[in-house]
Image (cartoon, rainbow, N blue to C red):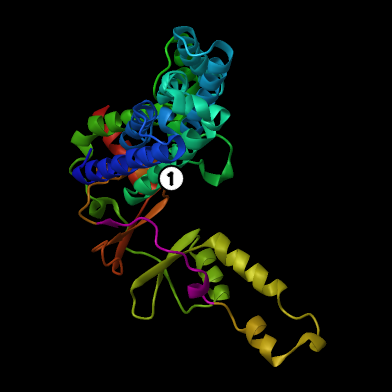
Amino acid sequence: MQSRELVLSGLAAVLGVALADVLSLWALGERNPWFIAPMGASAVLLYAVPSSPLAQPWSVLLGNTLSACIGVLCVLCFGVSWLSGALAVSLAIMAMAVTRSLHPPGGAVALTAVLGGPAIQALGWRYPLVPVMLDSILMVLIAIVLNQLLNRRYPHHVHRQQAAHAVTEAPPIQRQGIARSDIEAVLATRPEILDISTDDLEDFIQQTELQSLKRHQSQQLSGICFAEIMTHEVKTLESNMNLQQALQFLKRHELSQAAVLDSEGRLSGWVYWDDVCAALLAHTESQPESAEEWQPARAMMHWQPMRVEDIQKPLPSLVEEDWKVIDHIHWFIQGRHHVVPVVSDVKDATSLIGIVTQTDVLAVWFRLASTRV
C-alpha cells in the first residue's frame, strides 16, 4: 500500500470508528466496547481491503444487520446465556452464507446482541436498525468517498473487456488458455470459501498469462520501438471539411477511421466511418420536406453543412515513436485498439507523425515467431 493510500485509509478508519463511538453514546447512552469492536473490524475490511468480497456494501449492510437480528432473536428465545451467544454466532454465519453477505464482523455483531449488556438488550429490535445498520451505512459511505479520492472503483467489480463488433463471445484473450469454466470447476472441488471473487480470480489469471507471454517475448521485442513499425504516410481529414467530402475521402482511401487536423495542421480529434454516415443520415432526415416548412431561422439549422469538427471524437490512446512495442502490446491483443496514433509528445498530443495498426503489431510478432521457429 502506497503512503498516500495508507494515510487516507488510516484517516477513514479514525472517522469510521469515531462515528461508531458517537452512535454508541447516542443510541445506548454509554460508550459500549462490545458494539465498537465489531465496527473496528468492519473498518479494517472497508478501508484496507475494499476489493474483498467480504467488504462490499451488500456484505457489510446485510451481514451486520442480519446478524444483529439473529442475536436479538436468540436473546428473546433463550435469554442471556452461553447457549444463546453460541447459537447467535452460528446462525449468523449460516444466514450470511445463504444470502451471500458473508462479513466476518457480523459474528461479533450477533454476539454483542447477547453479551453487550443491559443497554443493548433494552433496545430489542431497534438494535439492528440503530445503531448497527445506521453505522454500517455511514461506514460504507466513507469507503465510497475514500476510494473516489484514491481513484479506485468501489463497490469493487472487475471491468470485463467487451468483444469487438458487438458479438456475444468473449474477446480473443479470454478464449485462450485457462477459461472461466475451468476456474469454476476447480473452485467447486474446494471445501473452503476463498476471499476472492471468481471475476477477480479470472482477471488475475489472465493478466498473469499476459505478463508471462510478454516476458517470454520481451527478449525479442524489447528492442523494437513504434518508430520501426509505424506507417509514416497518414491520410488525415481537415476539421473544416464537410461530411460529404469526409465520406468520399474515407471511401476513396478505404478507411474506417481517420485522424483530424485543425486549420494549423495540429492533431485535434478522430473520426469514424459509422459516425459520418449516421450524422449525414440524421441531417438529411431533418431537412424540410416542403416550401411551407421553410423558415429563415430553420434554414441555417437544416441546410448549413455539417463539418468534421462537429462530430469528431477525442483522441484514442497515444504512443510516442521511441516507446517499446512490448509495453503496449496488450492494447492490441485485448482488442482495445485497432489503430493508435504516434505523436512526438503525448503531453502535447498535437504533432501526428504516424500511426500503428493492429496489423502492424501482428506482422512483427509473426515475423519474430517465424524466425524463432
Q: Position of residue 152 (x, y in %)?
A: 36, 45
Q: Which of the image's four quarters has the C terminus?
A: top left
- Number of other residues with Cα within 10 Å of mark 1, as a class: few under 14, some 14 to 19, many 20 or more: few
Q: Nearer the viewer, residue 234 or 53?
A: 53
Query: Residue drawn 42% across and 28% down?
Result: 54
Residue 14 x/y as whole percent: 29, 41
Relative to 113, is 228 on the left or the right?
left
Q: Is residue 337 left or right of residue 322?
A: right
Q: Is residue 312 magenta?
A: yes
Would you place residue 94 above or below residue 339 in this image?
above
- Which residue reaches farthest bottom? 296
Magenta residues, start to end: 307-320
Q: Position of residue 364 (x, y in %)?
A: 30, 42
Image quadrant for the N terminus?
Answer: top left
Taking the image as drawn, is residue 171 in sight? Answer: no
Counting from the top left corner in percent of width and height, residue 283 is at 65, 73
Residue identifier under label 1: 141
Q: Quadrant of residue 302?
A: bottom right
Q: How many marks?
A: 1
Residue drawn at 41 percent across, 49 percent down? 337
As helix, strand or loop, the secondary structure at mark 1 comes to helix
Near-viewer residue (58 or 270) = 58
Does residue 241 show up?
yes
Among the 4 quarters of the image, the one containing residue 126? top right
Depth check: give the residue in front, 82 or 64: 82
Residue 19 highlighted magenta (yes or no) = no
Q: Is residue 259 above or below residue 117?
A: below
Up the image or down, 154 lies above or below 42; here it is below
Tell me which residue sits at (35%, 46%) in the image. Answer: 146
Instruction: Say which residue appears at 34% left-offset and 64% top-offset.
Output: 233
The amino acid type, in three-letter code, at marker 1 is Leu
